[in-house]
Each structure stands twice: as structure tokens, then as C-alpha cells.
């Protein structure tokens, strides 16, 4: 299973765009990249998933370069409510082998 | 209500006692998971199950036992609780191959071993 590496923590001011990068050098051909968000005292919740290039939804964008060895979660104009831990996972959605969350990136949004 | 529910929400137990954490899901998802979360360690996988009667170890399985006789239930048992098992435990479920793939998590069980 592909191991991921993320920064431990990040700070940002309200209204700014935040980019969190995840490294996954050993990503396999069938693997997708999925990001989760976790608030204190809650379980993680799905944010976005992608295979290559760019994916955008109402919450975030996910940028994946051609070699797929890294990915960047982009949160536009963050607010205080975006303060959370963000996890990057890599695995094959069709086989269920996307298990390991790691330590994630703790994002603190400052007023 | 549909979803994934964990019980109890909070539990205090004594060292050496057996304790079982319950997890129930209503979606008939094939995969279920148990994670523990401790400060500085993120989420660590304890056990997972790909289907009823199929379970496998994760990263930190020692001291835990799981079973899955029915698709919807995946209890986690601490056979002889230790203080190092004080943690927040999350159960999750998923169904691979159904389009956008993701986990759905329960609200967690905060376990304190004294």
C-alpha cells in the first residue's frame, strides 16, 4: 500500500486560499487519491477524490500532476470553520485497499 | 435512521476487564473498519473486515479481537484492557466499486482505562 507524507500542521488567515500537499511516491496504477476532513470529536468525512489532473467540487479542488507522485488539496477562501485535520489516502477504490490515514495535516485558520 | 452507529459513546473501565465496543451500519456495506485515534498518531487501523466472517489485522491489532457474523455489525473487544488502550475508537464502513469511494465514520467511542 502506498505510503503518504503530509505536513504536520499549517496556519492560514481567513479568506486566503490554502494548499495542502501530499506525497505518495509509490502510488500504483489503479490507485486513487482521496482527501478527508476531521473536526474535533468527530469521525473523518470525505472531501474529494481524484485519479489525475484536476477535480473540483463545491468544497475543494484536487490537483494531481502527470506523474501522480503527489497531490494538492486546495481550499478556496478558508473560514474559521475550516480549522480541522486533513488526511490524504491512496488506494484502489475497486478493491477496498485504501486503509491508512496517517497523522494528517492540522490546519488552523486565524481570524 | 440510516447510517453507522457506535456504542457506547463514552466508557470507563478498569485495567484487566473485558470491554466490547459496538458498531452497526445500515447500508449493507461490505467493508468495515476499526481505528483508534491518539494525540500525535492520527488514525491507526486496528482491524478490518471485507465481508461477513472475513477479518484481517491492521497496523495495531494486538490486544483486540473482532468478529463479524452479520454484515451490519462489527464489534471490537478488548480482552483485557490496559491503560495504553485509552483512546478514541472510530468505526467506519465502505463499499468499493460504487463510484466515488469513501468511508463513512461513526461518531466514535471515547474509552478510558483506569
Image (cartoon, coloured by chain):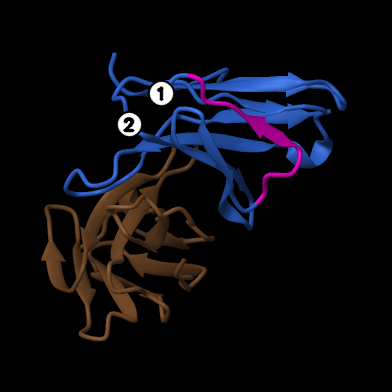
Chain colours: A brown, B blue
Residue toward you, A68 or B51 = B51
Q: Is residue B27 left or right of residue B35?
A: left
Residue found at the far right of this picture: B16
From what the image shows, is residue A2 above or below residue B65? below
Task: Assess whether mark 1 and mark 2 are in contact (beta carbons under 8 angstroms).
Answer: yes
Magenta residues (range): B60-69
Q: What is the chief secondary structure element of the magenta stretch?
A: loop
From what the image shows, is residue B109 above or below residue B33? above
Q: Secondary structure at mark 1?
A: loop
Q: Quadrant of the C terminus of chain B?
A: top right
Residue B56 image-quadrant placement: top right
CA–CA distance in space, label 2 to label 1: 7 Å
Q: Is residue B96 left or right of residue A56?
A: right
The residue that appears at 32% across and 58% down in the rendered structure is A35
Identify the residue under disc 1.
B71
Callout 1: few (<14), some (14-19), or many (20+) C-alpha neighbours within 10 Å?
A: many
Q: Chain of mark 2?
A: B
Residue toward you, A22 or B52 = B52
- Residue A4 in picture, x, y percent from top left: 46, 71
Callout 2: few (<14), some (14-19), or many (20+) C-alpha neighbours within 10 Å?
A: some
Residue B77 image-quadrant placement: top right
Residue toward you, A98 or A61 = A98
Q: Is residue B67 left or right of residue B1?
A: right
- Residue B20 included in the magenta stretch of the image: no
Q: Chain of mark 1?
A: B
- Residue A24 in picture, x, y percent from top left: 40, 76
Which label belongs to residue B29? 2
Amino acid at each position: 500500500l502506498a505510503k503518504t507524507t503530509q505536513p504536520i500542521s499549517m496556519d492560514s488567515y481567513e479568506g486566503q486560499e490554502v494548499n495542502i500537499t501530499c506525497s505518495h511516491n509509490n502510488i500504483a496504477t489503479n490507485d486513487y487519491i482521496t482527501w478527508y476532513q476531521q473536526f474535533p470529536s468527530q469521525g473523518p468525512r470525505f472531501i474529494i477524490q481524484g485519479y489525475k489532473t484536476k477535480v473540483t467540487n463545491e468544497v475543494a479542488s484536487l490537483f494531481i500532476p502527470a506523474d501522480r507522485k503527489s497531490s494538492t488539496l486546495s481550499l478556496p477562501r478558508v473560514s474559521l470553520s475550516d480549522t480541522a485535520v486533513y488526511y490524504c489516502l491512496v488506494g484502489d477504490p475497486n478493491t477496498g485497499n485504501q486503509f491508512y490515514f496517517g497523522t494528517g495535516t492540522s490546519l488552523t485558520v486565524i481570524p | 435512521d440510516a447510517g453507522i452507529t457506535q456504542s457506547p459513546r463514552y466508557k470507563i473501565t478498569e485495567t484487566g476487564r473485558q470491554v466490547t465496543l459496538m458498531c452497526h451500519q445500515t447500508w449493507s456495506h461490505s467493508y468495515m473498519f476499526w481505528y483508534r485515534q491518539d494525540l500525535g498518531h492520527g488514525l491507526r487501523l486496528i482491524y478490518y473486515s471485507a465481508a461477513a466472517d472475513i477479518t484481517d489485522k491492521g497496523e495495531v491489532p494486538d490486544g483486540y479481537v473482532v468478529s463479524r457474523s452479520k454484515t451490519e455489525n462489527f464489534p471490537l473487544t478488548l480482552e483485557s484492557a490496559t491503560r495504553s488502550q485509552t483512546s478514541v475508537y472510530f468505526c467506519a464502513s465502505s463499499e468499493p466499486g460504487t463510484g466515488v469511494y469513501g468511508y463513512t465514520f461513526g461518531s466514535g467511542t471515547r474509552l478510558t482505562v483506569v
